[in-house]
Amino acid sequence: MVTTTRTAPLPSLASVYRTRAVVELKEFSRQREAVVFTLLFPVLLLLVFGAILDYDIGGTVGVSIGFVQYFLAGVTAAGILGASLQNMAISIATERSDGTLKGLAGTPMPRHAYFVGKVAQVLAVTVAIIAVLLLVGVAFYDVEPPRGRDWLTFAWVAGLGAAACTLLGIAISSLAKNGRSASATVTPIALVLQFISGVFFQFSQVPEWLQTVAAIFPLKWMAQGLRAVFLPDQLAAVEPAGTWELGRVALVLAAWCVVGLVLCVLTFRWQDR
Amino acid sequence: MCGPEGRDVMGDWLPVTSTTAAHRGVRPHPGEPLDPDAAISVRGLVKRYGAATAVDGLDLDIRRGEIFALLGPNGAGKTTTVEICEGYRNRDAGEVRVLGEDPASAGRRWKAQLGIVLQSGAGDSQLTVRELVRAQASYYPDARDADEVLELVGLTEKARARGRTLSGGQRRRLDVALGIVGRPALLFLDEPTTGFDPEARRQFWSLIRSLRDDLGTTMLLTTHYLDEAEALADRVGVIARGRLAEVAVPSALGGRGSAPAVVTWREDGVRRERATATPTALVRELAERFGGEVPELAVARPTLEDVYLRMIGKRPEAADDAGARDEREDPAW
């Protein structure tokens, strides 16, 4: 009995990754709360804000730019934060407290495959949210889609931001007792960050000391990087540094990736304490 | 000596071909070498949590193909011992071999031979029962067909239901399906029937027996239900205060088989009771005295529960043997 199982080869990594990716996509897409909260809420915000706040923000630098164009950058950054940090913190805390993680750790599944599945889920949800926000923006509010090299900037800001926030979300999941407490902790923090990071208001209107606080966290840099994508270069003059600071955006987000990874390695648990 | 389902418990004893502790049916002695043929062999296992010692020099052998039930009160070190064998926890001292490997360093190939049914269960999944079993199967080298496994655990009708919509008993069966789909040589079952109604428990028991009888699966079962241990287990081990207090077939645990029987009857309007090593002789004597039927006659041996409660409550150490024997002769027990 034992000898026969010994001779059969373990399943390939590719097939285990495929299983995990499919499992994670089904788990997300079938959970109504997750879909509404992560995918539809940012779209709703865009629709409502777009309908109310349609003033021009380009006056001081001599161009005509509606606030929706500015808000689309911010709400996209917030959407990525939801798809990665909030989603990971809540879903992993839930799976840890209900025994899913412990069960997986008792199978011959290579443990890193669990994270491969989560990354696939974050990627899929992030791409979906960006696509829907862009479509709604273009269709209803005459938002100008990015052009040429802006797409490249869009891709690396979104990718690096999602990576940093995914790692932080995984790390935060270990602090929470269960999914509900993770949600109760992370949601208000995310909301505060959104207010001070230039999502709902122009970042230049945020008091300077709060700007400094926001600059510690990744969301501010994600929003700033995405503004470089969605806004004309004249508006860079309104930014705190007078430029888009794309080099610094990359540096801060990469630093958060490193911090998040170290925290994950130090704190990740496969079962409740 | 028959189990509740009529299976002769003693008849399942393997012929004594080896002198290892597992084959003698007794607890291994401290210092005895690990049994290389056993499914699980543990010597001098110690696990501490801070200042508290959860497992304190435990010795255990579980042979291949048997159902072994581990009994013990909460906090006796049961779950810790099992989780060390499963590879979930590290030990502080002692030696452990599970299917020939040390769980602390064994890899994926080793895990592929285990099935683990946790107390916590499979969680609140949005996946269907069949999807969950298929996903689990894809982690193993030689998995069973998912639909076959669902048939085996009686969940075929629920194959398309989402995991989170199952009732307690159905969830437990799903947990077992997930535990056996990888074709394990060794299956861990942690309190598998908690929350079952009697009917569901009977069904579950016959499933567990068929896994052993038809598929040769070795099983380590922990349970709080003594009737479950008696119905299922080939051998029972009682853990008390971090040590294995005794190992025996259920019918012989704590000297049950040879313990004095208690004969009760009614005579002159009062209830009489006598403990005796020769109940047959006493009954014959009574029958002669009454010249036929003896009013309210009953002959009882200590139940597994009587023995178990005494072991965990008053007899944690072998050194108390003498005291326990005195107690057994007390007709009041």
Image (spheres, rainbow, N blue to C red):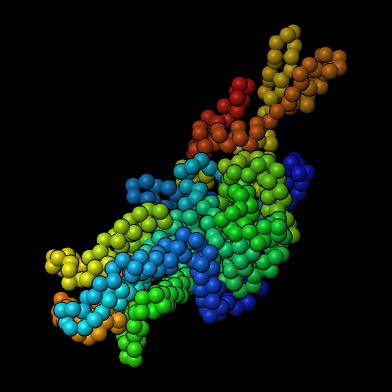
Q: Residue A56 in the image: x percent, y percent?
A: 24, 75
Left or right of B237, for residue B57 = left
Q: Is residue A144 above or below residue A223?
A: below
Residue, x 50% and y 34% (percent of image)? Answer: B313
Residue furthest toward the top?
B268
Q: Residue at x 39, y 75 (%)?
A: A140
Q: Residue at x 47, y 70 (%)?
A: A114
Coordinates of residue B24 in the picture (x, y in percent): 64, 51
Q: Is residue A50 left or right of residue B117?
A: left
- The answer to which image quadrant residue B138 occupies is bottom right
Taking the image as shown, residue A221 lies to the left or right of residue B198, namely left
Residue B78 in picture, x, y percent from top left: 50, 48
Q: Nearer the viewer, residue B267 or B124?
A: B124
Q: Is residue A254 above or below residue A35?
A: below
Look at the picture and state if B258 lies above or below B276: below
Q: Is residue A56 left or right of residue B94?
A: left
In front of the other: B280 or A84: A84
Image quarter hosting the N terminus of chain A: bottom right
Closer to us: A204 or A88: A204
* Residue B34 appears in the rendering: no
Is A88 situated above or below B30? below
